[in-house]
Image (cartoon, helix red, strand yellow):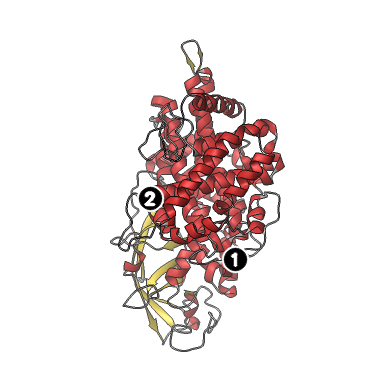
Amino acid sequence: MTTTADLETLLATHEDDVLAPDTLAGLDDREEFPDDAVRLLDAAGLPAHYVLTPDGDLSRTVRLLRAVSRRDLTVAIAHGKTFLGSAPVWVAGTPDQAARLAERVRAGEAVCWGLTERDHGADLLASEFAAVADPDMNAADGTGTDSGTDTGNANGHEDTGNGGSVGWRLTGEKWLINNATRSTLACVLARTDPAGGGRGFSLFLVDKNQLPEGSWRNLPKIRTHGIRGADISGFALDDAPVPADALVGERGDGIAVVLKTLQLTRIACTALSLGAADHALRLARDFATGRELYGRRLADVPHVRRILGRAAAGALTVEAVSLLSARSVHTLPGELSAISALTKAFVPTLTQNTLTSLGELLGVRGFLTSPPGDGFAKLERDHRICAIFDGSTVVNRAALLNQMPRLARKLSHRRTDAEGLRAAADLTAPLPPFDRDRLTMLSVTGCSAVQALPDLAARIRDQGPPRAAPLIDRLLAQLDRLERESADFVPVAGGLPSTAFGMAETYERAYAAAACLLLWLENPPLRTGRLGADGLWLRACLTVLLDEEGGDGSQGSGGGDDGSHDTDHGDGTHGSHGADDSDATALFDALADVVLTTPATEFTLWGGAA
């Protein structure tokens, strides 16, 4: 298996050829697929990490994709899409299906995920792409993914006429699909009951190479604002025959399998944002250290240092969330319906805000697509799609709000899965095997990280840096306010009020704060060195989350409801001003010092723990 260090070394050796910024920019200008870079990653063995076996490690996959994203988001998205396309089989496929697909993925075959349609977008229950059972077909017809073998009743069902051992014919169109044209396999959601509904859809793994000529048609590439070279296209099937063993899960399980799969893919997508933040910080650092203004380095200007330090704190905050969430796939799988939704809403949002603030620091260079622009404009527009992949921010916050009554009850009870939480937070602890059978549509136990916040705060008071105490007080005050506001919340049928989304954001910030506290408490190496001394990174991350900064106009995920930074919340807490603002300035100035003197690959929490 590929290690992060090995991949970093390989990528660094190719930064003057296939991964050279000018080369990647040229491909983007011409809207060409990055073939050479993808082949490089194939040869490096990266596809093997898209196979989520019981002994796999999703957090390692995230770290590897982050390393690629640090160079170019188009390359990472084009290559990493195979994990999204194959994940439904890791969640619901038979052992035989998983083994056969794993072999092909490891060999570098691309897999796409055909969910969305031109007229329906994210409304999967409105999908028209249809599959009709054909009892005259079976896997021995030579149209399966393993055409030389008669797999018979591949899904283990009795031959009841309910789709267990019959073939299928697929008809319809999927649109806005990543790698739709270049992939050899497609995992497709199809309507198997004309009446539709929650049990009216099923998933099929379709092998293009086994389809009769004329039954599959690629749709034209769609021009996009960002990731211009990616294969964003679609396909149409016309009475395409597929065997019984193409069915993933049981007939009618499609929507449930999709929702459980999204619990994995939404967390995996954080790798893209983490890499984008790394890339942007490097560009900003290089610009600030190499540019003079009014006779002194830009890096010595207080306002610039404040922006740079706050952006660095934002990058460390999203890393903390990603780390805890990715490891929770193995240790807290029953809570992923909540964890994945809040993670996917929070990480791209704070990262995009971070890119915006760094763009302001870069000034006009942040808008240039030719030298001396250094690629920031491409990076910024490429990252915008990350908030849309696998459910937009609004979709994910709605998913969180639909669980809020239960989450609120569990928060009031303060009960947690302490063992699972500790295993997720301790970056040196071995992870238990991934257990797909523990994935649930709704979390029965709530979200242990948020529910543990009062206990974590008490431990930080006892064990943490003394200067974190005022931040802990504010954190608990915000948690009390969240608990009061969520106690009587009931999702409204037919739509959620816009004011409710502020509650979802507050819950996301509570989770992010818990992630920071947990990582600090469970990893002694994170309490040492320049980042750990006096709780520097912890205090900076909590400051961003509590919106202690204020004053410079840059706003992270922790902005007040009215966009202000000096706000009485009605709970005895206030936005930053006076001494608090001075503390934040000193804090971000100290963090800027670390950024300015640390290589991008080392300015990470994971690097500190490792």
In the image, taking residue 200 as reference, residue 205 lies left or right, namely right
Q: Dot 1: what SS?
A: helix
Of residues 48 and 588, the one drawn nearer to the viewer in this rendering: 588
Q: Which residue is mark 2?
A: 501
Kindly identify the residue that appears in the image at 61 percent across and 28 percent down: 594
Of residues 584 and 179, the one drawn nearer to the viewer in this rendering: 584
Residue lying farthest to the bottom in this orientation: 160
Q: Give above or below for 95 relative to 593.
A: below
| Residue 100, percent from left and from top | 58, 70
| Residue 541, percent from left and from top | 55, 37
Q: Which residue is mark 1?
A: 103
Amino acid type of disc 2? Phe
Callout in the foreground (1, 2): 2
- On the rendered image, what quadrant is the C terminus found in? top right
Query: Marks 1 and 2, Cα distance to the nearest angstrom?
Result: 43 Å
In the image, taking residue 228 as reference, residue 527 lies left or right, namely right
- The count of marks equals 2
Q: Give above or below for 599 relative to 433.
A: above
Of residues 213 and 469, the one drawn nearer to the viewer in this rendering: 469
Confirm whether residue 554 shows in the render: yes
* Mark sitting earlier along the chain (1/2): 1
Amino acid type of disc 1? Glu
Kindly identify the residue that appears in the image at 63 percent across and 44 percent down: 458
Q: Dot 2: what SS?
A: helix
Specify the quadrant of the image occupied by residue 113.
Answer: bottom left
| Residue 514, percent from left and from top | 57, 47
Confirm whether residue 65 shows in the render: no
| Residue 18, percent from left and from top | 53, 41
